[in-house]
Image: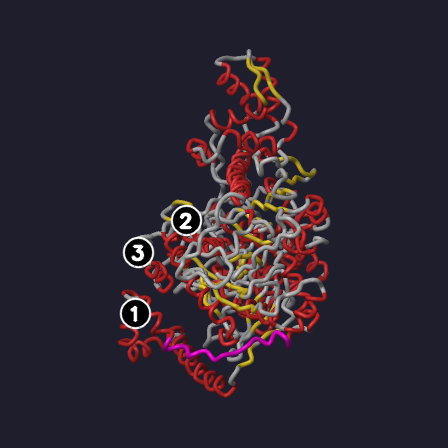
Amino acid sequence: MSLKIRADVARVARDIVPQWPLHSFIAVNPLGGREGIDFESIRDSGIALTRSTPHYLADVQSGRITRENLSAAVIERIPELRAHSVRIGSRTISAAKLIVAELTELAPAAETVRASQRSDVVDEMTAKWVASFLDPHPLWPMPHRRDGFYAAWRALARHDPAVSRSARRAARTLPARADDAIGHALSELKIGTADADAVLRRQLAGLPGWTAHIKWRAEHVGDIDVVEYLAVRLSLHLVLGQPVEDATPSPSDGDESPWTRAIRLVEHLHGGADRGATASVARVLAMHPVRDHPFTFQRAYELQYAGELLRTINGTADDADTADPVAPRPDIADTAGTVAPRPGSAGTAGTAGTADTVAPRPDTQLVACIDPRSEGIRRHLEQLHAGIETFGFAGFFGIPIRFASYNSSSAIDSLPALLAPHHRVTERPRDPASAQQRTARLGAHQAFAAGIHAGESTTAAPFAFAETTGVLFGAMTVLRTLAPTIAARCAAALTSTARSESSVTVADAFTLDERAGLAEAALRMMGLSQFAPLVIFAGHGSTSTNNLYESSLDCGACGGNPGTANARSAAAIFNDPDVRRLLHERGLPIPSDTFFLAAAHDTVTDRIRPLDAHLVPPTHLDRVERFARLQHTASDALVRERAHDLPGASPRRTPDRTRARGDDWAEVYPEWGLAGNAAFIIGPREITYGQDLKRRVFLHSYRPETDPNGAGLETILTAPVVVAQWINHQYYFSALNPDTLGAGTKTVHNAIGTLGVLSGQAGDLRRGLPWQSVAFAGRLVHEPMRLAVIVEAPLDRISAIVSRNAVLRSLFDNNWISLTARENSGSAWYSYGRYGWSPTRQSNIPHHEGAAQ
């Protein structure tokens, strides 16, 4: 019986998406467990999949949605209407235009109000017990905790003064094992086998935030699982006498009949009744029920943006042949070296240059994360100096590691959540004696910080703590409020010491063949074949004060951590002479004068700071210094650009004023993160070079000619694209459902340890992002659109990859994200659907003169 119970629970919990704790909060699609079904078929009460019709109608009025894109959305969603038309009086109207007329010209029927979940005493009590178990008080840990959640609750519930005596007596008779308790509760509550799955699902949906975190906890810590959680919930229902029926009403479609709708539409278009036309119109409208209206609006909304983006890409190809490269600034250019032309010029790998044309060697290459925030710094650097070439690659740089600094007792898993860490990398100090002294000083500082935390958080200590340190911390509070940047510098001086020079032990973590394999895969994926003397791997992170969601602003490809450890590891691998020897044997020679340098990109300040500078050879010091000046100028320009969008910021102020927002403990908008993300482009840089993509696009470099078997493209589609889809849907659903799939407003947030965030003092863990990450003053800043994946690669290669990967088939076939591709810069665009490829409306847009139309 217990095995069957566990199997039943595993089955109903299969669709639950784990929720990571705050210290490594990563983006997830909160409905990721439903990706096996069509996006539009989800009918969960209380969850919005689109905006409301009035919002879309306002977009039609403003031109954000055009009638052409509405017609395209209708045909895409109902292909059988493509060639269908209806005669009304003397007019012949296409079926798509009929539907567009109904959408835009007739007042919509009242929308069904989504019901919210009712408050439940079992939810309240379960949340209290789960919180006590997972976040034990430092002085009074939960008794019996080591016996497991259900056992601890069962032992304590009989003494719980919050429940009646009869409930406490009933708790004494409960089975000792969690799985037996589930079976016992189902039996006593008269839940038959046929209804058991539905009851278990509703119980898991009662506190979805806690349930999602428990699933993560079971997989990564193992001190609690869903079986124990359900045992407590069902046992509470039993001893409290609470019913397990779902009191939340299911949503109603609220459709009018096609005939009624047809009468209204014909009268509107014809000026009177036409019974013959009404029958034909009703047959068309029956294929597009009222419940589908928001999805057609949403798809048109997405097609409008995608079309503009494709026109931008097409326009780049035309401009590349005629526009002059951006001239380097005379005070920062390398006057002694050769300035490379912009990407796409003759001779650049993968372009239409003659066979004997040799492309000028770039001066410096920057490999940045695909994160949309990197698009801005890449664009500004390229505008400053044509000798800089940039690439986009997943921010862990293909190096999956568990990393611990030499002075830390803990480690971070710096790799995508799709992977498990199997390689541990640490640091080797250049001067062990100096490092040991620094570690001792840092240990004292950490002990001081731990003492402060204990004094603030334990029950009696704050009173004595305030008496003894109140003046000091009162002054610090004033400083943090009035001069946050100075306060941040003071805090850093008190809690840290100068960093000792070190190198990462990547050679101890990976074999030589593994290191060479990782390097080869990275080069083939991003198409890096011509190497500059200086190649920089820039991992990114974010710095902000008093921000519970700070890790959500770090690198998603690094598990919600900064990508600096991975950048250092990648640089160490590519600088290894033995790795270079193997790469040369595999047809990927790296010049002997090329040096790889790691760097850190802070997305609040947009500074790029070199790491391991002590490893830079004397021959490259000038280049590193020149890049430092370039990035300083590019950073200032980008910060001014971002200041247009940040609430309370101004491009007229100095960039440092905007940067200081990260030090301000009252600032809820230190940066916008990935708000606005909408597309993922896979292709060579020249197709987007020089274009302002508004920091909305994931950019992954790729050249098909350097990836002959398609393995690199398959990795990009099945890993970075999947992670980007998680990010995209977290922003999407947080914007549309701030109180259920988002985290609500920050103003009432309370952290519960490092587990997550509550709104107020109790209740469910909040899922998704806070309202301040997607909106400002009641206005959405993030446009909720499903990710548009755009690829430049052979269509048959893409088709083969999608066909053999179930995760991609689910995402593309079930309309969670879209896929558009072309063979090369002279080809037409095609859209992927579950029945194959079809030309897009953008396929008629000119590319090059003489290109296929």
Range of residues picked out in magenta: 493-508
**Mark 3 belongs to which amino acid?**
Arg
Residue 335: image quadrant is bottom left
Determine the residue positioned at 63% across, 66% down.
Answer: 590
Name the amino acid, label 2.
Ala
Q: Residue 243: in sight, yes or no?
A: no
Rendered residue at 51%/39% (across/down): 308
Secondary element at tag 2: strand
Circle 1 sits on which residue? 477
Q: Earlier in the sequence, mark 1 or mark 2?
A: 1
Figure quadrant of residue 827: top right
Residue 498 drawn in magenta: yes
- Is residue 33 left or right of 492 when viewed as pictured? right
- Residue under label 3, please give it: 653
- In space, the residues marked 1 and 3 are separated at their CA atoms by 25 Å
Q: Secondary structure at mark 3?
A: loop
* Residue 167: percent from left, percent from top: 53, 62
Against 701, residue 755 (above or below) is below
Q: Position of residue 236 (x, y in %)?
A: 55, 59
CA distance for labels 1 and 2? 29 Å
Sequence-first disc among 3 and 2: 3
Callout in the foreground (3, 2): 3
Q: Amino acid at mark 1?
A: Thr
Residue on which disc 2 sits: 775
